Image (spheres, rainbow, N blue to C red):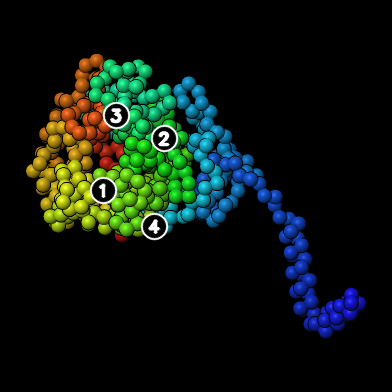
Amino acid sequence: MNTIASRRIHRLLHESPSWLTSMVFHMILLLVLAMLTMPEIVESTGRTILMGPIDDLTTEDWGSAPPSRKIRLDPHIYVAAPAPPQWNADGFDEGAIFVHDDFPSNVRLDPIDGGLPRGDDPLDRVPGSNGTQRIQDRDKGFDDHRGTPEGRAVALALKWLAQHQMPDGGWSFHHAMHPECHGQCRNPGTLSEARSAATAMALLPFLGAGQTHGKGQYRQTVKRGLYFLVGRMKVDPHGGALNEPGGRMYSHGLASITLCEAYAMTHDRQLYLPSQQAVNFICYAQDPVGGGWRYEPRQRGDTSVVGWQIMALKSGYLGYLRVPTVTMQKAMRYLDTVQYESGARYGYTDTGRGSPATTAIGLLCRMYLGWKKDHPALERGVQWIDEQGPSANDMYYNYYATQVMHHWGGPLWRRWDSVLRPQLVGSQAQAGHETGSWSFKHHHAERGGRLFFTALAAMTLEIYYRQQPLYRNQSVEDDFLE
């Protein structure tokens, strides 16, 4: 049988054209060479995922990871294996990668298209070649206000917040748990489980004053706080989740704003992955039908939770993270379902339960999503806020409404400012351990407590400085729905 087969192969080769025989031979040779040169598969132990086309990444992008540890996962995802953070008395080492030891290295991120300004790629802005100058400019702006009543109020607020940072780097709405405070400050909140939300709210005033983890009087405070947030992130194929008991999606929205703002202010590449992962989770958690967000992922939305998520997405967009346009289009449709008075007012979950706060949130979201000053509904909404004026005790409303009025500008803003600014400065605590903090009689007082009000009041006063990307005119001028 073997002899017959050999004769048939010999006859086939003899009768075949020479070009065909040569092609078959060379194909077999190439296959053999490919098998001999195939590299050994190395299991990744990396902790950092860098997203972007391979041509955009340089050797500096990989940090200190040796070439043998750089493994290509797909056309958009690459993994490096830098050293874990090194702790010392003041926090983690300056040169350490800003990712928690337990941060997964093998999570697949599907590339998200859309949401980037035309002609821009996020990694082109990441290295931060002008990052130092940007921080210096922000510090100068805050220094110009240090001698003003609101500047002194913010400085006192930052001092109070720093004094109530927990030993683990985070904060708690139950601020009395701090070992040095130990109940000296009244009005603690009850949301002791919502650590990510409390930490995010405490960090935002520092960022608003130009204090980052790389520069400023409170850089170690900010650094430890950011590390605390990153360490609490739970990563899966949907993104990086920071929702938690008590705070739920409120916590994730607030923490996402903090990470995105810190990244946008510094372009620190070590914050790129956590920020993008947080944005990815917001996109996943959106109600696929109604377009909103609520307490749990993919739940039918409410305007209060929606406000924090849209602010986070806008912050990510301003920082050149990837934000899908379709997510914002769905959010716009959600706002359509809770608006009344033709878009000048907004309800909580429908058109029948409106409040000053939900109206201010809805209008600010409309500004972020592209409504301009010539939009009739926006003009009527701003007029309505002007008629209400600042609240004496609802800082949640004041915070959102102040941003709306500030972006609107003109005489209406000046009238709002002339009432709210002295009201906030005059109501700040000036005695004992409470010095620099705020507390108001409101239904938020029981849950968020003094930390909640102090953070909101400080952030409201910082709107004048335009330190954070979200407070600048660019935040409402850049339209990512076009």
**Given this view, does label 2 or label 3 mark the residue nearer the observer?**
3
Indicate whether 223 appears above or below 237.
Answer: above
The residue lying furthest to the top in this view is 432
The amino acid sitting under disc 2 is Leu
Measure how far apart labels 3 and 4 are at the Cα level.
40 Å
Percent coordinates x, y for residue 72 in the rendering = 59, 51
Circle 3 — which element?
loop
Name the one closer to the observer, 183 or 245.
Answer: 245
Pick whichever of labels 3 and 4 is earlier in the sequence.
Answer: 4
Pick whichever of labels 2 and 3 is earlier in the sequence.
Answer: 3
Residue that mark 2 sits on: 229
Residue that mark 4 sits on: 114
Residue that mark 1 sits on: 302
The amino acid sitting under disc 1 is Asp
Indicate whether 301 appears above or below 259.
Answer: below
Pick whichever of labels 1 and 3 is earlier in the sequence.
Answer: 3
